[in-house]
Amino acid sequence: MTEGYLYCFSNASMPGILKVGMTERTPEIRLGEANSSNTWKPPTPYKIEFAKKVSNPKQKEITLQTLLSQYTERINPRREFFRVSIEEVRTFFDLMDGEQWTEGDEKENEQEDDEDEVEDEDEEPESFSNKKSAPIKGCREMSKCFTNGQRIRHTIGINKTWTGIYDSSKNGIVYDGKALSIYKFASSHYASERPDRTSEVNGWKECECEVDGKWISTYNL
């Protein structure tokens, strides 16, 4: 069972916005990485508001960010920044089993060399027009990925779910009488449930399809 830290960083240059994520090393090392990025380094340094040592940190990060996405405003679906108060984030942290981190815990003298913990794919910068794009994973054509009558669903937060049916004759996901692309299916759900949310949506990454009675991510097709 892996262990790591959930952390909450603030930055004086971004009042009211907090960075909430996880690391399998220490909060101090993650702080150093956030402050050393030449591409996205903010005018003022991040600071650690609080952190918590937990088991299964990646799963707990997903749960934490799902809650924050549903009850607060996620600035960008591909980044770990939320418009939320420190008190609200602390309340969500209190729901997670673990040990509160205090400065100086488990000091590590050097950063790892090969396991460079960059922001994962969810946090990949968007302005990569002048760089080679990473290859698109798996199937990305609905006519090749889905079968007629297959159920497709999109969930916001924990329990706000739309479930549509793929219609091969229309090459669309039918929901509320409309045949939609996977992007439009997800973005329309946000427009209905979370009109305050950014319009940037990755339908393939956020949706699931039913295969043999089980729901799997369309991103993994």
Image (cartoon, rainbow, N blue to C red):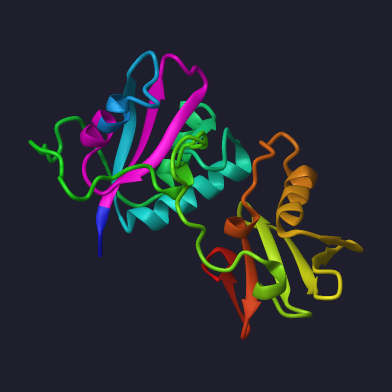
Number of numbered discs overlaid on the protein picture: 0
Task: Classify 141 as above or below 213.
Answer: above
Q: Residue at x 66, y 36 (%)?
A: 198
For this rendering, which residue is in front, 72 or 46?
A: 46
Asked whether, in this view, residue 72 is left or right of residue 52, the answer is right
Q: Residue at x 30, y 42 (%)?
A: 52
Asked whether, in this view, residue 1 is left or right of residue 162, the answer is left
- Looking at the rendering, in which quadrant would you find the C terminus? bottom right
Q: Residue at x 79, y 72 (%)?
A: 165
Q: Position of residue 21 (x, y in %)?
A: 39, 41
Task: Classify 109 as above or below 17.
Answer: below
Quarter residue 99 falls in: top left
For this rendering, which residue is in front, 124 or 30?
A: 124
Q: Position of residue 57 (x, y in %)?
A: 34, 53
Asked whether, in this view, residue 179 is left or right of residue 108, the answer is right
For this rendering, which residue is in front, 102 or 60?
A: 60
Asked whether, in this view, residue 205 is left or right of residue 190, the answer is left
Residue at the far left in the pictured view = 109
Residue 175: say if magenta: no
Start-end of magenta stretch: 4-32
Residue at the far right in the pictured view = 177
Q: Position of residue 114 (x, y in %)?
A: 18, 50
Residue 17: say if magenta: yes
Q: Residue at x 78, y 49 (%)?
A: 188
- Looking at the rendering, in which quadrant would you find the N terminus? bottom left
Q: Position of residue 179 (x, y in %)?
A: 85, 63
